[in-house]
Image (spheres, rainbow, N blue to C red):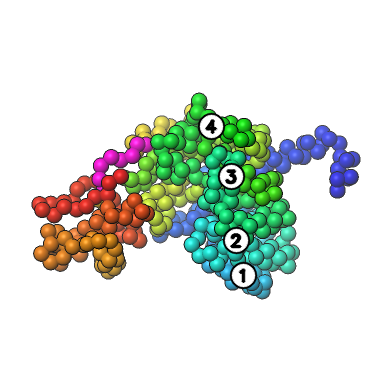
């Protein structure tokens, strides 16, 4: 092949390379999550994806209704083998063949399936068994595609930044010791051999929000004009946190002997809302981050990162919708570009062609500084009473004397008041355990308030931030 290329005129070769790079760079996609009970239909969702001018879409399963709705569109599709199938597929080629036959073959090639991802953030899961079955499952899926004559679909797996045990400075990027040799090295071998990508989820929001004193907000939002970070070892200079995070992965791969594997940004975004204790989750920051990152991804020629200047970073923004049944803190339900009714959370154009001047003014950010006062955790309106009763029992079983004041003769006891007692228990639990990871969520049964519910001699414990 190299000898044949010698006969290709250099100008034509450069033209072909630039066309392919531009083609890859110009296609920002969106993650289409489905963890909501009020989301539009797949066919309506596909229209909304096109309205956002996305060129790619990633789904977190193999939903046949979505794959059917994507048939005969120009949207390139990434689909997923669910986490719970990985262990079985890893040791069973027949099962892998059956999965591809049932979930890919009926739609391909009319649905432009280009990437088949095995699991989602598997190396962040507590179950270590599945870690070691990840790459074997990827090999089985790749073989199954080949058996069915599908050779243009690449196989990968999206991983979070927590695969690194060191990421600062970027040149010190190192994979975690518990996965480096046993999982990451075989993964890199597979990706390199099959010419696939390292799919990476990159959120500058999380490192910034956990350390807003030492990380500048503008640096996390691509807004910094005069803030730079210099890597003392590589000598590279960084103007934003995103590049810093991506380059940490590049250096980590280089450390294992794979300096050239391409990176795909599988998720990135910023929450437009959150709980009182979640700093910086607002529409202004979300719009600013996503518009700026889109500008970076669509830049022509490609800008890459300091460690790989000029490289293409294909991407999926997270997420299409605010998803109201996603577990965890409120930010998890507020990453969407659209509300479930299809309206914009803020105006955005994934092609990057809408000039900044055409967007209207954004609402002021009111929570870029940590909230100072205490916060209480109360039962949410409309919460299921039997579920609340179970959550009350759980909260009272944790900690030291958590629920003593709501026992008979206690200062906060109210006969036959489940919601009142549960609200006290939720607040008492959260006040004790927030600093070690306890949340005010309780499976969607709880909500935060800054209005003190205490009365008379009954004092509700509040979480101090």
Q: Residues within 10 Å of mark 1 (few under 14, many from 20)?
A: many
Q: Magenta stretch: give its range.
A: 368-375
Residue 288 has which mark? none
Relative to the observer, which residue lies in front, 211 or 234?
Answer: 234
Dot placed on the residue nearer the N-terminal end, 2 or 4: 2
For the residues labelled 1 and 2, the Cα–Cα distance comes to 10 Å
Q: Does residue 323 appear left or right of residue 392 in this picture?
A: right
Q: Main secondary structure of the magenta part?
A: loop
For the point 56% across and 58% down, the residue is 178
Disc 2 target residue: 118
For the residues labelled 3 and 1, the Cα–Cα distance comes to 32 Å
For the point 49% across and 49% down, the residue is 319
Disc 3 target residue: 173
Disc 1 target residue: 89
Disc 4 target residue: 229
For the residues labelled 2 and 3, the Cα–Cα distance comes to 24 Å
For the residues labelled 1 and 4, the Cα–Cα distance comes to 44 Å
Disc 1 vs disc 4: Cβ atoms closer than 8 Å? no
Relative to the observer, which residue lies in front, 403 or 416?
Answer: 403
Q: Residues within 10 Å of mark 2 (few under 14, many from 20)?
A: many
Q: Quadrant of the C terminus?
A: top left
Residue 81: tell me if it is visible: no
Q: Any magenta on residue 68?
A: no
Q: Quadrant of residue 83?
A: bottom right
Disc 1 vs disc 2: Cβ atoms closer than 8 Å? yes
For the point 56% across and 31% down, the residue is 230
Residue 129: tell me if it is visible: yes
């Amino acid at each position: 092949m190299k000898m044949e290329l010698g006969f290709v005129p250099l100008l034509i070769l450069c033209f072909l390379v630039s066309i392919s790079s531009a083609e890859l760079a110009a296609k920002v996609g969106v993650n289409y999550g489905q963890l909501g009970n009020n989301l539009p239909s797949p066919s309506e969702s596909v229209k909304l994806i096109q309205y956002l001018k996305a060129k790619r879409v990633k789904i977190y399963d193999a939903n046949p209704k979505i794959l059917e709705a994507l048939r005969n569109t120009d949207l390139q599709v990434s689909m997923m083998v669910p986490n719970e199938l990985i262990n079985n597929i890893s040791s069973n080629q027949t099962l892998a063949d059956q999965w591809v036959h049932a979930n890919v073959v009926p739609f391909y090639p009319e649905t432009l399936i280009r990437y088949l991802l095995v699991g989602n953030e598997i190396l962040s899961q507590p179950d270590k068994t599945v870690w070691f079955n990840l790459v074997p499952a990827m090999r089985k899926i790749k073989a199954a595609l080949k058996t069915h004559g599908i050779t243009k679909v690449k196989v990968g797996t999206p991983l979070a930044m927590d695969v690194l045990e060191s990421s600062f400075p970027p040149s010190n990027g190192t994979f975690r010791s518990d996965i480096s040799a046993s999982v990451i090295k075989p993964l890199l071998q597979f990706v390199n051999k099959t010419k696939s990508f390292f799919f990476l989820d990159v959120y500058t929001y999380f490192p910034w929000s956990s350390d807003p004193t030492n990380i500048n907000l503008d640096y996390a939002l691509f807004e910094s004009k005069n803030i730079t970070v210099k890597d003392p070892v590589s000598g590279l200079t960084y103007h934003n946190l995103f590049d810093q995070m991506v380059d940490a992965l590049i250096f980590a791969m280089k450390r294992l002997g794979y300096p050239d594997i391409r990176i795909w940004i599988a998720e990135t975004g910023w929450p437009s809302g959150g709980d009182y204790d979640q700093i910086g989750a607002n529409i202004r920051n979300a719009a600013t981050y996503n518009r700026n990152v889109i500008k970076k991804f669509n830049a022509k020629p490609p800008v890459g990162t300091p460690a790989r200047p000029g490289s293409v970073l294909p991407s999926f923004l997270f997420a299409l919708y605010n998803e109201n049944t996603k577990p965890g803190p409120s930010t998890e339900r507020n990453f969407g570009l659209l509300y479930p009714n299809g309206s914009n959370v803020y105006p955005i154009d994934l092609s990057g062609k809408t000039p900044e001047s055409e967007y209207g003014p954004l609402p002021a950010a009111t929570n870029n500084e940590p909230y100072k006062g205490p916060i209480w955790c109360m039962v949410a309106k409309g919460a299921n009473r039997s579920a609340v009763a179970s959550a009350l029992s759980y909260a009272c079983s944790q900690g030291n004397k958590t629920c003593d004041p709501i026992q008979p003769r206690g200062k906060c006891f109210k006969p036959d008041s489940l919601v009142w007692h549960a609200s006290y228990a939720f607040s008492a639990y959260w006040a004790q355990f927030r600093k070690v990871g306890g949340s005010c969520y309780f499976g969607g049964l709880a909500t935060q308030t800054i209005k003190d519910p205490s009365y008379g001699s009954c004092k509700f414990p509040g979480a101090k931030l």
